[in-house]
């Protein structure tokens, strides 16, 4: 094989490989894939640019191809969705222009029901806008109003402080008057009551209370002596209790004696029984004698039991 | 003459010795029952009724329920004479074991069940009185009371009448007179109290007051 042929083959092979790689990349990028075009509408075209990505669940599935105004002044946004991603676009899909505070704006597709029918290409869907910047401004605005209000209040307060006829200055002057009065009065009570006679009455009442307390103290002392003194009630009671205890001990002996006596009596009762038996015998003997005499003297008949 | 006297004495002694001796239980029971009667009526028998108990004990030693029931009926009759209630359970138990028509008739009389009484079986002293009791004829009964010669029987009859039949002060006064004549305190207090209540019931307060004062004085 000649040298020229070899070079020719190398160039042709290299070209084929390069073309094949390019074709592969183009295919992978979806250059040859079929695309579907859907039309969205918006009142404003702010933040919309051609080539803006269309995102579904965080994945790019297409992009904005063209922007144009229709006769009614509405912005028509045409988006191209590759065939393999068109299955995410359904009739109930929502298209939201999302403009984050940081990062590029994008159109977010949300499909709640993937079983719903596909979105027809000729249908124009209204697009909503979520604007983080505007939301942040809306949130900051009331805060700014409050800061402004605080600043106004601070200004008013400072004005009041600087004003000689202001509330604070009036309070301070009143405090000065009170301290002056306090320094001139004999007591805090006099200042509170504001009547010297009443204060005098209170003093007298307090003196009486003091006297009463003193008397009660004395009475308590006396009571203490009467109760706990050498000849007080409690020592006497203790003495009485000791006497009672002693007498009870003696009583124990008495009870023992009584027990002994009752035992003796019980023994004696046996003698009594014997004695009674003797008496019964004697009475019966006398009875028998009397009966026999009665039998001898009188002609006694057989007694007859008759009902009365 | 001397021989005649000696023979007569021996004959007397032999005559005394020939009679049969009275059984001990019978004599004791009879005497105790008689003592009980007197003590009960004179209010000397306490609540334990010791003489009745002795009479009952002596009578029961003969194993004769008929005699024992007679003793019990005597006690019931005395209670009736003193216008008191009596516990007849013992008699009824004996009557069940050993029925006796005469005792039953007497018991029915004491209980005021006159229609159940058979006149012939009653002690003769009550035989004429029973029809008047059945008819509640007090005036006729009063006449009959006058002809009865046993004070205790009359008092028992008065007690039966006052306890079970409508009465007036005449029969109560009669009972008071009989009790007073014999010194029977227990029925005397009972009839005086009954008479006082009778007068109170008939709005005769003065008479009732008199009886009350009499009772207080007598009981002093």
Image: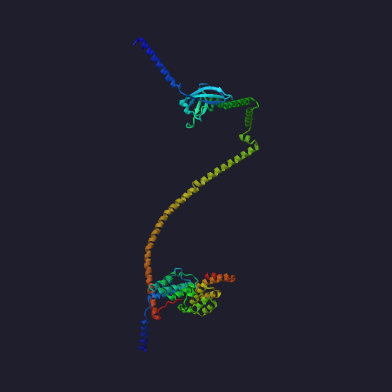
Residue B175 as seen in the image, left or right of residue A205:
left
Q: Quadrant of residue B213?
A: bottom right
Going by the picture, which residue comes out furthest to the left? A1
The one nearer the camera, B66 or A258, is B66
Going by the picture, which residue comes out furthest to the top? A3
Q: Quadrant of residue A180?
A: top right
Going by the picture, which residue comes out furthest to the bottom? B1
What's the colour scheme? rainbow
- Give x and y (percent) for residue A69: 57, 23
Residue A174 visible in the current orientation: yes
- Give x and y (percent) for residue A163: 64, 25
Please give the name of the residue rendered at 37% of the width and 68% of the height, measured from the top-left corner.
A275
The one nearer the camera, A202 or A111, is A111
Residue B208 as seen in the image, left or right of residue A265:
right
The one nearer the camera, A209 or A223, is A209
Quarter of the picture containing the N terminus of chain B is bottom left
Residue B188 visible in the current orientation: no
- Give x and y (percent) for residue B21: 37, 79
Q: Is residue A142 above or below residue B195?
A: above
The one nearer the camera, B66 or A60, is A60
Residue B52 as seen in the image, left or right of residue A166:
left
Please count the marks in the image: 0
Q: Is residue B6 above or below residue A228?
A: below
Q: Is residue A17 above or below residue A171?
A: above
- Give x and y (percent) for residue B72: 44, 72
């Amino acid at each position: 094989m000649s040298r020229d042929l070899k070079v020719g083959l190398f160039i042709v092979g290299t070209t084929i490989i390069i073309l094949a790689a390019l074709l592969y990349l183009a295919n992978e990028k979806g250059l040859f894939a079929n695309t579907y075009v859907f039309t969205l509408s918006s009142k404003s075209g702010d933040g919309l640019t051609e080539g803006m990505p269309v995102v579904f669940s965080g994945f790019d599935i297409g992009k904005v191809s063209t922007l144009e105004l229709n006769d009614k002044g509405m912005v028509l946004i045409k988006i191209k969705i590759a065939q393999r991603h068109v299955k995410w676009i359904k009739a109930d899909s929502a298209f939201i222009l999302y403009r984050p505070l940081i990062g590029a704006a994008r159109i977010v597709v949300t499909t709640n029901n993937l079983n719903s029918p596909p979105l027809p290409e000729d249908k124009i869907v209204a697009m909503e806008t979520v604007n983080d910047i505007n939301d942040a401004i809306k949130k900051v605005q009331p805060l700014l109003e409050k800061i402004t209000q605080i600043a106004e209040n601070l200004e008013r307060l400072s004005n009041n402080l600087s004003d000689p006829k202001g509330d604070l200055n009036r309070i301070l002057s009143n405090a000065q008057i009170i301290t002056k009065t306090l320094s001139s009065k004999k007591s805090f009570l006099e200042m509170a009551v504001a009547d010297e006679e009443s204060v005098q009455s209170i003093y007298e009442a307090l003196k009486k209370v003091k006297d009463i307390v003193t008397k009660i103290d004395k009475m308590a002392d006396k009571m203490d002596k009467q109760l706990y003194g050498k000849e007080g009630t409690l020592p006497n009671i203790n003495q009485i209790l000791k006497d009672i205890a002693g007498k009870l001990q003696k009583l124990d002996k008495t009870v023992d004696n009584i027990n002994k006596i009752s035992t003796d009596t019980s023994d004696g009762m046996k003698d009594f029984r014997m004695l009674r038996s003797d008496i019964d015998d004697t009475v019966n003997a006398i009875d028998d004698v009397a009966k026999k005499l009665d039998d001898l003297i009188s002609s006694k008949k057989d007694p007859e039991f008759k009902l009365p | 003459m001397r021989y005649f006297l000696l023979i007569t004495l021996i004959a007397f002694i032999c005559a005394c010795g020939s009679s049969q001796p009275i059984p001990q239980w019978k004599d004791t029971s009879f005497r105790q029952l008689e003592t009980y009667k007197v003590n009960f009526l004179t209010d000397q028998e306490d609540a334990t009724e010791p003489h009745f108990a002795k009479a009952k004990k002596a009578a029961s030693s003969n194993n004769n329920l008929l005699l024992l029931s007679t003793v019990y009926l005597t006690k019931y009759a005395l209670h009736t004479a003193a216008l008191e209630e009596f516990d007849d359970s013992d008699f009824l138990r004996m009557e069940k074991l050993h029925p006796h028509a005469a005792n039953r008739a007497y018991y029915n009389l004491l209980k005021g069940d006159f229609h159940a009484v058979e006149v012939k079986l009653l002690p003769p002293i009550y035989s004429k009185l029973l029809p008047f009791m059945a008819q509640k004829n007090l005036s006729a009964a009063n006449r009959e009371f006058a002809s009865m010669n046993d004070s205790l029987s009359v008092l028992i009859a008065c007690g039966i009448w006052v306890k079970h039949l409508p009465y007036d002060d005449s029969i109560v006064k009669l009972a008071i007179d009989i009790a007073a004549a014999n010194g029977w305190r227990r029925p005397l207090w009972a009839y005086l109290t009954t008479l006082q209540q009778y007068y109170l019931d008939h709005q005769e307060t003065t008479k009732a007051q008199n009886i009350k004062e009499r009772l207080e004085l007598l009981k002093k």
